[in-house]
């Protein structure tokens, strides 16, 4: 167990290095010069060059040897932009936004936006998990009847549909005809404007959880220990909660655990569509503005979040089901 | 990692009650599938969609980009069956051409990503094991560490100008004309980015399947008869993953149609004026237009909804027919 943990933790920095390096290189060779975008219309080549120099954007990407000579012996190492970036990140400095929120601390920005995305994500996860579990149980208990495939197919179908395809139908029904929901905007978790995006976002987890809950319930109810529990006269409710419930919930745990990572990452589409100032929206915006410090920080933070969520899921699994050995 | 730890259901020999004497598993699956009316309907719809895409130049009554500003937002009529959009472009023609984009991108990315890359890497990792396995799976972990479709977005957005440059050189060198104008660069870019991303899931699944298959007696028998590694891999192991592969290809087609929609909707995929269903949804999604001219958007999102529903019911039927034990 401990060895497994250590191995996972040792591998983490390698993944993070690869992920950040890949993003860094793509950003470096990608189109659009952030400094030119920043200057806008009146970009003076000299000024652009000066700003590039000030920000160190003219330096090589990777470590290189400079000014070396054999006689007199001299050598200096230019660490390059990437190493500098990683070094700063290790010191807790994610840099400053270069174009979108010029001069603001990226860490502060991200923190604000994550707070927004996390509220939305939490609410939609709550809706998704509870509805998904109810639907999955209902499907399993109606196995063999038409209700079972109807529930599973429609749940999966709805979760496969892109959110922006679903939204117009909802707007037409709830906004235009019924006039009961506001369309877009943000006012925190207690504001009615969160309802529609939360529902739309919950459909993803609903589909997966319904299917998982159904199959795991079906597997559990045929187990010997369930029959034993019933035959020794335990009340049906106790059997359902302690014997069926606890064991069929195991796979759900994975989905919920992994979804915790999306609380940090937000959602590109939902947040853009409903005008929610969260991380996903920030990532898309900074993408178009070539704000690489923000993009890098976003990639880094979400990758860390996914890694932690994965780890928690694996460890939680072996705790909930002692038959599983981590290796 | 995760998948290794979980208990796999013990292999049981299950009699196939509806299997006829001397009937092969393929004909059995086909017969089972043809019994499912809903799944057959799904298949018919998908085929119709793909045929529409392939035959777009013959079917579309107008060009996808021909504007007529005098006839903007026309209601459906004999001349324009689905009406016209803001620029007076015929919606039916645009939808047909948009279907072509979906068809090209999904087919290409599934062929390269799922069928070619994913299967080959999965079989290699599963059968060879050891260092090859570790290498392939660690690379997969890195790809999985990127949140959502961020990697696809990064690749698509940063490499676009380079891709156009390459195609222009190709045009100059060979004398082909009109490739850049036809949006070929966008197609290549999107399906390239999608295939880079989409091999991971299928490779992991195939690897898992191969890991369990290679312990079977028939592989041992083949090896003891002196069969080469390549022969075992491609003649003994690969054919037994075909069920899984068919299901994954179906899911992959649906998934990449969705991914293309999302990328184009975000403004990173297919660029206007090339018709793409994602771009068309984005263009017509404003709230005011949904109030005044809902028919423009409704025709597009209805088509998308129907296609996704078709994929869902087809996939469900396929799954039932090919993996009767997975019920």
Image (cartoon, rainbow, N blue to C red):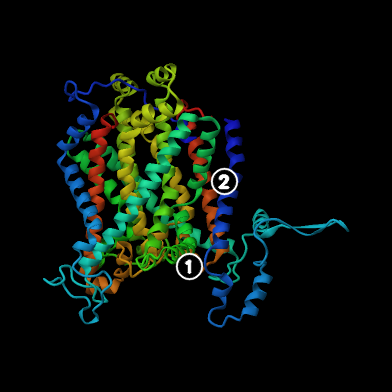
Mark 2 belongs to which subunit? Answer: A
A160 over B128 or under it: above or below: below
Counting from the top left corner in percent of width and height, residue B49 is at 22, 54
Seen as rendered, the residue at the extreme right is A72
Q: Badge 2: few (under 14), some or many (20 or more) residues near its Cα, within 10 Å?
A: many
Instruction: Please identify the quarter of the rendering in which residue B149 is found.
Output: bottom left
Mark 1 belongs to which subunit? Answer: A
* Residue A133 falls left or right of residue B93: right
A249 over A301 or under it: above or below: above
Which of the pair A65/B318 is nearer the observer? Answer: A65
* Residue A88 falls left or right of residue B75: right
Circle number at residue A15:
2
Q: CA distance from mark 1 to mark 2?
A: 26 Å
At mark 2, the secondary structure is: helix
Image point 24% across, 70% down: which residue? B63
Query: In this rendering, does residue A283 appear at all?
Result: no
Seen as rendered, the residue at the extreme left is B78
Instruction: Please identify the quarter of the rendering in which residue B245 is found.
Output: top left
Counting from the top left corner in percent of width and height, residue B74 is at 18, 75
Name the residue that disc number 1 marks. Answer: A288
């Amino acid at each position: 167990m401990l060895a497994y943990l250590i191995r996972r933790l040792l591998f983490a920095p390698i993944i993070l290095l690869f992920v950040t390096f890949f993003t860094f290189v793509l950003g470096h060779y990608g189109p659009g010069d952030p400094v030119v975008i920043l200057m806008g219309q009146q970009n003076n080549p000299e000024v652009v060059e000066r700003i590039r120099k000030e920000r160190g954007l003219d330096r090589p990407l990777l470590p290189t040897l400079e000014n070396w000579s054999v006689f007199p012996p001299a050598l200096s190492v230019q660490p390059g932009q990437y190493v500098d970036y990683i070094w700063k990140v290790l010191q807790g400095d994610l840099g400053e936004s270069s174009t979108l929120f010029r001069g603001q601390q990226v860490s502060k920005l991200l923190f604000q936006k994550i707070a927004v995305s996390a509220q939305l994500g939490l609410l939609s996860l709550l809706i998704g998990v509870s509805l998904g579990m109810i639907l999955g149980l209902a499907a399993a208990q109606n196995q063999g009847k038409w209700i079972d495939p109807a529930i599973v197919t429609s749940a999966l179908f709805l979760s496969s549909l892109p959110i922006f395809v679903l939204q117009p139908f909802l707007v037409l029904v709830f906004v235009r005809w019924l006039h009961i929901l506001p369309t877009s905007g943000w006012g925190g978790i207690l504001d009615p404007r969160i309802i529609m995006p939360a529902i739309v976002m919950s459909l993803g987890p609903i589909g997966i959880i319904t299917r998982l809950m159904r199959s795991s319930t079906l597997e559990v109810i045929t187990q010997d220990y369930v029959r034993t529990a019933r035959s020794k006269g335990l009340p049906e409710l106790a059997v359902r909660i302690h014997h069926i419930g606890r064991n069929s919930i195991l796979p759900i745990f994975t989905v919920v655990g992994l979804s915790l990572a999306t609380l940090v990452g937000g959602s590109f589409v939902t947040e853009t569509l409903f005008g929610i100032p969260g991380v996903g929206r920030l990532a898309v915006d900074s993408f178009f503005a070539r704000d690489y410090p923000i993009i890098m920080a976003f990639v880094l933070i979400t990758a860390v979040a996914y890694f932690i969520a994965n780890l928690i899921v694996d460890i939680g699994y072996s705790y909930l089901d002692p038959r599983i050995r981590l290796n | 990692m995760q998948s290794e730890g979980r208990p796999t259901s013990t292999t049981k020999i299950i009699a196939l009650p509806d299997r006829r004497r001397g009937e092969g598993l393929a004909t059995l699956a086909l017969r089972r599938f043809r019994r499912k009316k809903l799944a057959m309907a799904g298949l018919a719809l998908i085929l119709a969609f793909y045929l529409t895409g392939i035959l777009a130049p013959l079917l579309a009554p107008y060009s996808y980009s021909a504007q007529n500003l005098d006839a903007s937002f026309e209601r459906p009529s004999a001349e324009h069956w689905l009406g016209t959009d803001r620029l007076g472009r015929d919606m039916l023609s645009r939808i047909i051409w948009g279907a072509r984009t979906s068809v090209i991108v999904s087919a290409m990315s599934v062929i390269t990503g799922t069928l070619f890359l994913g299967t080959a890497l999965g079989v290699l990792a599963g059968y060879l094991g050891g260092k090859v396995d570790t290498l392939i799976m660690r690379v997969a972990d890195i790809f999985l560490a990127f949140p959502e479709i961020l990697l696809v977005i990064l690749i698509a957005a940063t490499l676009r100008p380079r891709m156009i440059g390459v195609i222009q050189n190709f045009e100059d060198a060979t004398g082909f004309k009109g490739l850049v104008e036809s949006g070929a660069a966008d197609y290549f870019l999107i399906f390239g980015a999608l295939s880079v991303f989409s091999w991971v899931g299928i490779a992991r699944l195939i690897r898992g399947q191969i890991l369990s298959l290679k312990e079977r007696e028939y592989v041992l028998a083949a090896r003891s008869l002196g069969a080469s590694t390549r022969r075992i891999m491609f003649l003994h192991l690969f054919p037994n993953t075909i069920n899984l592969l068919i299901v994954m290809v179906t899911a992959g087609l649906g998934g990449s149609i969705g991914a293309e929609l999302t990328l184009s909707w975000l403004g990173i995929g297919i660029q206007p004026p090339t018709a793409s269903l994602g771009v068309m949804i984005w263009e017509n999604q404003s709230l005011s237009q949904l109030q005044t001219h809902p028919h423009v958007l409704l025709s597009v999102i209805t088509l998308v909804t129907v296609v996704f529903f078709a994929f869902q019911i087809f996939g469900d039927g396929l799954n039932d027919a090919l993996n009767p034990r997975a019920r």
